[in-house]
Each structure stands twice: as structure tokens, then as C-alpha cells.
Amino acid sequence: MTERGQLWHGRFEGGPSEALQALNDSLPFDRRMFREDIAGSRAHVRMLCDVGLLTEPERDGVLAALDAVETEIADGAFAVVESDEDIHTAVERRVTELEPAGAKMHTGRSRNDQVATDLRLWTRGALDEIVDLVVRVQRTLLAQAEAAGDAYLPGYTHLQQAQPVALAHHLLAHGWALQRDVERLREARARTNVSALGAGALAGSSLPLDPAQTAASLGFDAVFDNSLDAVADRDFVAESLFTLALLGVHLSRVGEEMILWASTEFGFVELDDGFSTGSSMMPQKKNPDIAELARGKAGRLVGHLTGFLTTLKGLPLTYNKDMQEDKEPLFDAVDTVRLTLLALDGMLATTTFRTDAMAAQADSPYAAATDLAEWLVGRGMPFRQAHAVVGEQVRAALAGEGTLADLVAAHPDLGADAAALLTPGVSVTRRTTHGGGSPVAVAAQLERFRATLG
Ligand code: ARG
């Protein structure tokens, strides 16, 4: 028998095949949960002592060995042996080498409740970290919105110029989307922060365990209600993947706009050299790679979500080895979102907004057409009729019958007061309603956004 047989040696005659080990082993990727695994074992060992399953000297010996193993792994001094199938078996094997009472560490515990607990601890920390990074991007958007003052640009629908809006309004639109991500991340964290420890392999234990104690000592808000569900549930992984995927989709939309705005055709932004790349062949190029990668990474994040949901679909209760497929997509999603947020934040913080180019586009008289129609409504004309009157002037101007301003000034229902709405910089000031795009309305919105960020 190989050393590998140790873990479940009783009923096996031969050791595992190489092919099984290569497919089955998760240590290469789950070792990054070593701190969580050791924290879970500390809580478990203390509880075992409190309920009389470990003596105090045994507990202290195992705790000291857990400390030593944590240091070994953190220092890169941990020597993996062939039998180390995953982080749980590796830690237990080494603890037991250092302290014979380590053989009691797995009392009343299975890797099934252990891995669910470890991954919940890891996910909780990761979600907290991502929240902090999203808030950082929100603060950058806020700072740029504040710096934008009364600058304005065309707002778009169908990527066609629609109505002018304050630049701050546009930037804050992304800030609010990120706020919903923050809320979702926090809600996902709340459902993640439930202990599975004490569920055993699937059915609980005949030993006098105290799951509430281990839950409390690990900082969980609650303990599982059903042992079968505790070891079978990976909703917190799926939910985290969804939340990260939607966050990634939001970042892809920011990225896409920065790509457009940085183009020669738009010329709305100048990216900082430190956050742009050049071309190996074309000397004039300055490329928005960060924004493109923000756009591209969203595909990978959506892939992790759909892949993992497909893994879970149809799995019978309770633990199945398929579920070991939870970690790599989750780890990669967190790593991907972390890198994207950091780079995008730097890019946004250093971007120069070409407000002259924005205003030049937004001052197209056609962008004020809705203001003309609303001006007529203010004088009692039904909106449908007003829409038709202005639409006729737009048609005539486009047909070369005169400038829109001249046509409006000469129109019996419109005239000079209406034509004044076409003066550059006027249209953007008109939409002063709650949450609207004028600088006055945006000032109130900035207050709300600041208060939301706290
Ligand atoms: N490495 C495993 C995983 O990540 C740990 C749980 C193994 N449980 C078992 N019954 N084989 O899912």
C-alpha cells in the first residue's frame, strides 16, 4: 500500500492509481485556503476539549502544531508528501507528525463539513476585499464627477446623440450601478457567513459536539439548520459568482465607453500614458488595453457562473466530488475582479476629460429639439403636436432650408425666445427634475452619492 492509503486505509488493499491522484487531488488549488482550514481546526479542537473529547494538554499540543504548520505553509517551508490529497489532509498529516494527538483532530468532523466551512470563511474574506475595491472605484468616480464641474456631453441612446447631460451625471450613473454591486456583495456575504461545521459527513454526529460554539468562535452569524443541506449547499459560491459576473458586466460597460471616448472620432478623453499601451508596429498608437480587458474579462466571469451552475445542476444530496469544482472558478473570479478593479481605478483616476470636445458635440442644435417641444408644451400646446412642429423644423434644417436656429426664430409658434434654447450650453441646464442631467439636479445627486458612500 502506498502512503496515500492512510486516509481511508481500512478497507482498501491497493493504493490509488496515478491517474486517480492526478484528477482527484485539489491541493494545488485549495492550498490557498490554508489559513481558513487551520482557523477551522483551531475552533474545532477547542470545542472538542470543551465537550470532553480532548484533554487540555492534547488540545494545547494540537493548537501549537497548527500554529507551526501555518507558519511552515506561510513561509513556503511546508513539504508536501505524496499522500497530501487536499489542504485538509495535508494539514492534518503534518499536525499529526508534530503532535500525536493530531490523530484526534478529525473527531466528529468530515472533510465535507470542513471544506464547506473553509470555503465559506475564504469567500467571506474575499467578498469583503472586493467591496473595498469597488468602493475605491466609486470614490474615484465621485472625485472625477466633482472635478467635472458644469462640464457636459451628449447623452446617448442607441449610441445616437440624444440630450446633453452633465459629465458628472454620466460618471455617477456608473457609480450607482456599482452601488448595487456593493449591496449584492454584502447580501451574498450575509448568506455566506453561516457555519457548516458539525454537520459531519452528512448526518451530524453521535458525539456531543457543539456546532454553535465553533460557529461563534469563527465569527459566523449563524449555524446550519440541516446537516444534509450544510454539506450539499454551494449557493454561496454560485451567488458570489453571479455577483462578481454582474460587477464584471458593469465594468465592461465602463470599459466600452472609455474605449469609444478615447477614439480619435470621439476624442472625449485622453488616457494617461501609465494606463495605456503602445503598438509594436504603429508608432502613433495609444491603446486603451485596460478598458478592453475590463470589457473582455466579463466573458470569463460569466463563464465561471454558468460553468458552476451546470456543475451543481442535478447533483443529488449531499456531498459529491463534483463539488470540488467550486474552488477554481471562485478563486479565479475573485482574482480577475480584483485585478480589473485596481487597473480600472487607476485608469479612471488619471484620465483627462476633453470637455471642449464633449461640449462641441453636445451643442449640436438638434440635441435641444426636445427642449423646444417642451417649451411649446409650457405654452399650452399638446406634446404630440409640439413634437410634430419641432420635428418639421428639424426636417427642414436637415434639408438645407436654413439653420435650425433661423427656422425656429421665424416660426410663428416658436420665435426668438425658443431659439435662445439653442444657444450653446443652455439645453443641459433645462432638465432640473429629480435625478435629472442638469448641473443643478446633479448637485443634489452628488450629495446623495456622497452620503451613500459614507
Ligand atoms: N477536496 C475536497 C473538496 O474540495 C474536500 C472534500 C472531500 N470530501 C470527500 N468526501 N471526499 O471538495
Image: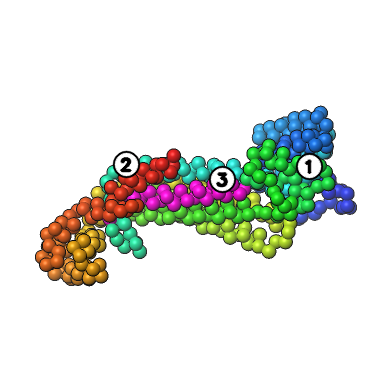
Q: Main secondary structure of the magenta part?
A: helix
The residue at 51%/58% (across/down) is 299
Cβ at disc 3 under 8 Å from ligand 1 = no
Residue 332 visible in rendering: no
The CA span between labels 3 and 2 is 30 Å
Disc 1 crowd, CA 10 A, few/some/many (<14, 14-19, 20+): many
Disc 3 crowd, CA 10 A, few/some/many (<14, 14-19, 20+): many
Please give the label number shown on residue 147. 2
The answer to which of marks 3 and 2 sits earlier in the sequence is 3
Using the image as rendered, state which of residue 337 and residue 238 is in the foreground: 238
The residue at 65%/62% (across/down) is 313
The residue at 53%/54% (across/down) is 245
Going by the numbered disc 3, the residue's amino acid type is Leu
Please give the label number shown on residue 105. none
CB under 8 Å between callouts 2 and 1?
no
Using the image as rendered, state which of residue 429 and residue 41 is in the foreground: 429
The CA span between labels 1 and 3 is 30 Å
Q: Looking at the image, is 402 positioned above or below residue 56? A: below
> Is 58 placed left or right of 237 in the picture?
right
Q: Which residues lie in the magenta part? A: 164-192
Find residue 156 and report its image quarter: bottom left
- Residue bearing the label numbered 3: 127
Task: Find residue 278 and report its horizontal and vertical position in percent.
Answer: 39, 48
> Is 43 placed left or right of 153 in the picture?
right
Please give the label number shown on residue 209. 1
Disc 2 crowd, CA 10 A, few/some/many (<14, 14-19, 20+): few
Going by the numbered disc 1, the residue's amino acid type is Leu
